[in-house]
Amino acid sequence: MGMERLAVEFERDDGGGVLLRVSGRLEHGTAPLLDGVLHALRSDRGPVTVDLSDVDHIDSHGLDVLLAAEADARRRRASMEVVGVRESLRSKRSPLEE
């Protein structure tokens, strides 16, 4: 098993919006970090953008964190957007789908 690494950079703009720049591997061992950051932002009224441009791997745990945060934002009528998903991550399929 390789080293698990995830970094989350936080930037707030003048309008109160938050940009989270995520880099590394969003997986079982690292997903709780992003989950914690997103949970801490629940009380913010400004929009949240999660930039995954520098994420090179997402597993089901990472996807669960993103989907749960998006569903929570919808329930609260808040804005959350995920951007920068690499095409290589979008096109990966399970061996069962091939």
Image (cartoon, rainbow, N blue to C red):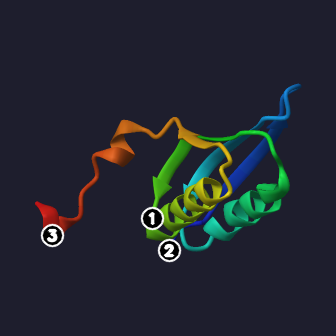
Residue at 64 percent across and 55 percent down: it is 73
- In percent of width and height, residue 38 lies at 72, 58
Q: Considering only order in the chain, which callout, 3 or 2, is on the residue closer to the N terminus?
A: 2
Looking at numbered disc 1 in the image, what kind of residue is underneath it? Asp
Q: Is residue 23 above or below residue 37?
A: above
Q: Quadrant of residue 3?
A: bottom right
* Residue that appears at 65% across and 50% down: 77
Please indicate whether residue 66 sits to the left or right of residue 18 in the image.
left
Q: Residues within 10 Å of mark 1 (few under 14, many from 20)?
A: few
What amino acid is labelled 3 in the image? Answer: Leu
Q: Label 2's element?
A: loop
**Badge nearest the viewer, 1 or 2:** 1
- Examine the image and state in which quarter residue 31 appears: bottom right
Residue matched to label 1: 59
Q: Secondary structure at mark 3?
A: helix
**Disc 2 marks which residue?**
1
Q: Which residue is most to the right?
A: 14
Q: Mark 3 highlights which residue?
A: 96
The amino acid type of the residue labelled 2 equals Met
Give the mark nearer the N terminus: 1 vs 2: 2
**Whole-Å distance between the Cαs marked 1 and 2?**
14 Å
In the image, farthest residue toward the top: 14
Q: Is residue 44 above or below residue 34?
A: above
> Does residue 47 lie above or below 24 as drawn?
above
Q: State the image coordinates of residue 58 (x, y, percent, origin top left).
A: 47, 58
* Mark sitting on residue 33: none
In the rendered image, residue 12, in percent from the top left (x then y), is placed at 85, 35
